[in-house]
Image (cartoon, rainbow, N blue to C red):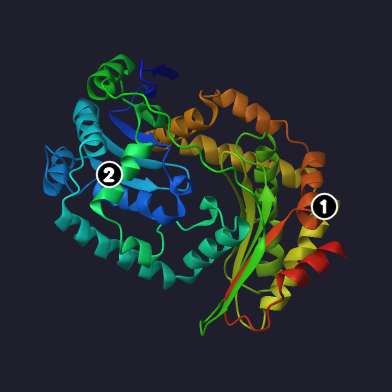
Amino acid sequence: MTVRQDQLKNGFRIVSEHMPGLQSAAIGIWVTAGGRHERIEQNGIAHFLEHMAFKGTERRSALQIAEAIEDVGGYINAYTSREVTAYYARVLKDDVALAMDVIGDIVLNPVFDPREIEVERGVILQEIGQAYDTPDDVIFDWLQEQSYHDQPLGRTILGPSERVSAFSREDLSGFVAEHYGPEQMILSAAGAVDHDALMAMAEEMFGHLKPRKGLIAETARFTGGEARQEKDLEQAHFALALESPGYRDDGIYTAQIYSTAFGGGMSSRLFQEVRESRGLCYTIFAQTGAYADTGTTTIYAGTSADQVAELATITIDEMKRAADDMSAQEVARARAQMKAGMLMGLESPSNRAERLARLVQIWGRVPSLEDTVAKIDAVSTDNVRSFAEVMAAQAPAALALYGPISGAPSLADLQERRAA
C-alpha cells in the first residue's frame, strides 16, 4: 500500500492510498472549517452548512443526491467536528468517479433553498433538544466549555438554539466564502482508487478555484472550571478533564498510552477498582483526545447519587497511585491495545481515508505507519509514570456534573485532594 500526495496550483490537496484486493473505495473532501473556526455569532453554522449540503445543488435535488449514490449501492454522509467538516462516500471501485462528482457538487454548488433551510433548521433544533435530553452527551459539551472557556474551541458544535434559529441564507454563503477556499480543502481517498485519475478529476472540478487564505483559528488556552446542574435523573454523571498534549506534540503518545492503561478497557485500573472491586458504576472510562494545539485527558462515569462522592474521591486516589506504581506490564498492554486498535481500524478504507486527511491537515504530510508504531513503542514506563504524576497533581482541570449531584465534591475539593 502506497500513499501518494499532490497539490494543485491553487493549493487544493489530494492524498490517496491504494489498498490491493479491495473492490470498494472511500472518498471525501475534508475542509478545515469546524466549530473552532466560527466567530461567536456564527456558533453552529459549520454544522448547519454540513446539513444543507445534502439539500440540493445547482444540478441535483436532495433526492437526486441520495439516489445517485444509493442507486449504485453506495453510502454518503458528512460530519462536523471542532476542527473539520467532512463530506464522504463509500462506493464500489467502478463508481469512484460518480462519488467524486456528487461530493464535489455538494461542496461547490449548494443552492441553499430558503424552504430547505427552514426544514433543516427544524431538524437541527430537534437535534439540539435531543442532545439536552441525553445526559452523557450534554455533559461533554459542558466539560468542553469549562476546559476552553470563552473560546471558539469551547463552544458546542451544534450551537445554541437562538443562533440556529436566526441563521440566514446569507450567513451560510458568507461562511463558505470565508472558509471553503482550495487551500482549506483536502481530497482524501483509500481503497480501490487510482491516484492519477483522482488528480485529473480534482483538477477538472477544483482547479478553477481562486486561492484564498482561510481565517486562522484562535490559539487554544485550557482555562479549567466547573459546571454542575442538579436534575432528577437516575444517575449522577461525572466528567473530569485534564490538559494534555495536542496532535503536534509527541507527548500525545504517552498521554494516549496513559489513558488506555488507566481507564481504557476492562483490564484498566479504573474499571477494575471502581466497577469490578467496588461496584460503584456500570460505565467508567478514560480517554485522551487532541486538537492541533491542545488536548484533554477525560475521565467519565455514571453512578448513583449516594456514591458519586466516593467515586470521585477514588478516581483522584487512583490517579495518584498510577504515578507511583504504574507497571511495565500495564504499559506494555496499553501499547499493544493502542497499536492493535489503530492497525485494525486501518483495515477499513473509510478509516484510512479519514486518517490521511487529518494527518495532511495537521502535518502537511502523512507519516508512515512504521514511524507511528515506533513512537508508540518508544514510550517507556517511566514516561507514563511521569505523565501520570502531572495528571495527578499539576495539570489544569475542568469538572462537569449532572443529575442528582448535591453530594458530589466540587472542583476545589478535588484539587485539594490532588495536592494532598
Q: Which disc, if any, is residue 121? A: none
What residue appears at the point 25 percent right and 45 percent down from the top-left corner?
A: 53
Percent position (x, y) of residue 118? 20, 61
Q: Is residue 348 above or below residue 116?
A: above
Within 10 Å of disc 2 (Cα), the crowding (few <14, some 14-19, many 20+) is some
Q: Quadrant of residue 328?
A: top right
Looking at marks 1 and 2 on the same chain, the residue that comes earlier in the sequence is marked by 2
Q: Quadrant of residue 398?
A: bottom right
Horizontal arrangement in the rendering, residue 162 relative to residue 342 (left or right): left
Q: Which disc, if any, is residue 173? A: 2
Q: Nearer the viewer, residue 409 or 195?
A: 409
Q: Nearer the viewer, residue 215 or 312?
A: 215
Q: How many marks?
A: 2
Q: Amino acid at mark 2?
A: Ser
Horizontal arrangement in the rendering, residue 284 relative to residue 42 (left or right): right
Horizontal arrangement in the rendering, residue 87 relative to residue 120 (left or right): right
Report helix, strand or loop for mark 2: helix
Report helix, strand or loop for mark 1: helix
Horizontal arrangement in the rendering, residue 343 relative to residue 202 (left or right): right
Q: Is residue 18 visible?
A: no
Residue highlighted by disc 1: 323
Percent position (x, y) of residue 333? 68, 44
Percent position (x, y) of residue 150? 57, 58
